[in-house]
Image: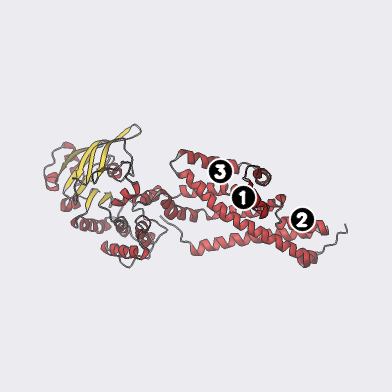
């Protein structure tokens, strides 16, 4: 073996810039998708808690469908399959902007929100029934009761499983390179194609993923520990 | 016109017939005490009045209007009929003050500072001062129940329902809650109280209703109820608890 390690290649200069650019895209697509997945997951979870049967079925179908099909296939569907059913104007707008990024966000959001919805539902079930009763009894509507009483308590309980869903999303975001989003993995691959120094490129990108995950996990845990009141009954 | 008119109220839990035709009228300012053995349907009965429980037949009218009328908004109805639960059910993630202000702000659209002023006034009225910024878990059971009363009063209900408000309390805290309830009664609040506190019934109630097996067995003004219970079941019950 006479492979010459060249760390300088990926730590400095043009190739390092590529990696940084990819890192920024990964952070961006993850952040946007996490926020959207959290919102979507909350809506899907709460729909299931209503007394309206069709809404419950819709929520159930959504979670089961998106949890039980491969993310890669879903990404391909949004990227290659979806444009045929979208109105022309929407397609034009998407192509003019960042079609790849948008498809990636939709794919990651929808897939992760199905898992998040299940975590949120578990959180809701761990809140005593009398909390919803006490909120409805003073005249709060169903939505208000969830918004101000039930969900704030449920979220405190499910922080740990939520963190792992966020981390899954960040790691899963590497799949968006397959639909042409120039994320960290895409860029590492690019560096490898130009330099044949795949070992260095992918070592660096792996460590960057590890770094992001550890930081996110640590930050949320600390926030939870110091700023969120632990609910006792 | 009576404030609350209940007519032939019946409810089943599956096969179990919980309420077997309750007919009752409550006038404005009246204080009713409802007692009876556990499982007699008394809690279920008062919970039907603010639609926390659904029922299968009979009618309940509030201010002359059927509570299941199409144009009755269930949330506004509930804001007019306050309820205090056995287990207090305060919101554990909110401070005492926020527990009280949540409904006025969200249901009544009251500005925050006004809601806080009202809340502080109510907290003072129930004897909770200087605790507004604590969390429920930091308060004793009696204090929590008094906060729950303030929370129910914050949306200015016309009627207050009490569902065994002192049953979960340590004995030494029962009186502080009863005193708040007595004050309310004296101020003219219309109240339906499910309770076994017979001292309270004697002192402030206008009528005592005895329920057993899903029906009203006997009802009378407190003096008469305690001195001359007519029904055997009432006598047996009173013997048990007095």
Compared across the picture, whether B4 is left or right of B155 comes to left
For numbered disc 3, what is the local secondary structure?
A: helix
Residue denoted by label 1: A106
Q: Position of residue A221 (x, y in %)?
A: 55, 60
Depicted A20 relative to depicted A83: above or below: below
Residue denoted by label 2: A189
Label 2: few (<14), some or many (≥20) within 10 Å?
many
Front-most of residues B160 and B168: B160
Depicted B241 relative to depicted B123: above or below: above
Q: Quadrant of residue A166?
A: bottom right
Q: Can I make out residue A182 in this image?
A: yes
Q: Position of residue A25 (x, y in %)?
A: 67, 59
At x 33% / y 60%, what residue is drawn? B140
Q: Can I make out residue A104 in this image?
A: no
Mark 1 or mark 2, earlier in chain:
1
For numbered disc 1, what is the local secondary structure?
A: helix
Q: Give the chain of mark 2.
A: A
Circles 3 and 1 in contact, beta carbons < 8 Å: no
Residue denoted by label 3: A63
Mark 3 or mark 1, earlier in chain:
3
Which mark lies nearer to you, 1 or 2? 1
Compared across the picture, whether B43 is left or right of B207 comes to right
Mark 2 or mark 3, earlier in chain:
3
Question: Do marks 2 and 3 both belong to one polypeptide chain?
Answer: yes
For numbered disc 2, what is the local secondary structure?
A: helix
Q: Position of residue B113 (x, y in %)?
A: 35, 66
Q: CA distance from mark 2 to mark 3?
A: 33 Å
Q: CA distance from mark 1 to mark 2?
A: 23 Å
Which mark lies nearer to you, 3 or 1? 1
């Amino acid at each position: 073996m006479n492979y010459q390690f060249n760390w300088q290649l990926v730590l400095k200069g043009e190739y390092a810039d590529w990696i940084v650019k990819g890192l920024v895209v990964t952070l961006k697509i993850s952040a946007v998708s996490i926020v959207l997945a959290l919102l979507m997951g909350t809506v899907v979870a709460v729909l299931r808690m209503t007394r309206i049967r069709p809404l419950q079925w819709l929520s159930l179908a959504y979670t089961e469908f998106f949890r039980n099909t491969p993310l890669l296939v879903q990404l391909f569907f949004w990227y290659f399959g979806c444009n045929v059913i979208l109105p022309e104007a929407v397609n034009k707008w998407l192509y003019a902007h960042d079609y790849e990024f948008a498809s990636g966000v939709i794919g990651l959001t929808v897939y992760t929100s199905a898992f998040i919805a299940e975590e949120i539902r578990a959180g809701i079930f761990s809140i005593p029934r009398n909390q919803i009763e006490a909120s409805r009894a003073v005249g709060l509507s169903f939505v208000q009761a969830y918004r101000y009483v039930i969900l704030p308590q449920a979220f405190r309980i499910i922080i740990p499983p939520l963190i792992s869903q966020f981390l899954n999303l960040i790691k899963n975001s590497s799949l968006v390179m397959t639909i042409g989003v120039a994320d960290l993995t895409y860029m590492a691959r690019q560096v490898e194609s130009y330099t044949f120094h795949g070992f260095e490129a992918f070592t660096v990108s792996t460590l960057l993923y590890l770094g992001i995950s550890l930081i996110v996990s640590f930050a949320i845990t600390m926030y939870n520990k110091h700023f969120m009141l632990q609910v006792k009954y | 016109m009576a404030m609350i008119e209940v007519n032939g109220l019946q409810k089943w839990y599956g096969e179990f017939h919980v309420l077997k035709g309750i007919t009752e009228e409550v006038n404005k300012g009246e204080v009713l005490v409802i007692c009876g053995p556990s499982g007699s349907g008394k809690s279920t009965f008062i919970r039907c009045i603010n639609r926390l429980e659904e029922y299968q037949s009979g009618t309940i009218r509030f201010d002359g209007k059927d509570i299941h009328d199409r144009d009755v908004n269930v949330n506004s109805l509930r804001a007019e009929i306050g309820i205090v639960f056995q287990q207090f059910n305060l919101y554990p993630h909110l401070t005492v003050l926020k527990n009280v202000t949540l409904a006025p702000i969200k249901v009544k659209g009251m500005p925050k500072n006004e809601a806080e002023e009202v809340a502080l006034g109510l907290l003072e009225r129930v004897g909770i001062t200087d605790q507004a910024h604590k969390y429920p878990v930091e308060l004793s059971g009696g204090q929590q129940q008094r906060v729950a009363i303030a929370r129910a009063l914050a949306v200015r209900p016309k009627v207050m329902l009490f569902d065994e408000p002192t049953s979960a309390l340590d004995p030494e805290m029962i009186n502080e809650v009863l005193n708040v309830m007595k004050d309310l009664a004296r101020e003219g609040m219309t109240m339906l109280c499910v309770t076994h506190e017979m001292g309270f019934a004697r002192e402030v109630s206008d009528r005592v209703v005895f329920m057993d097996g899903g029906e009203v067995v006997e009802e009378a003004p407190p003096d008469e109820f305690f001195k001359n219970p007519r029904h055997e079941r009432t006598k047996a019950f009173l013997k048990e608890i007095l």
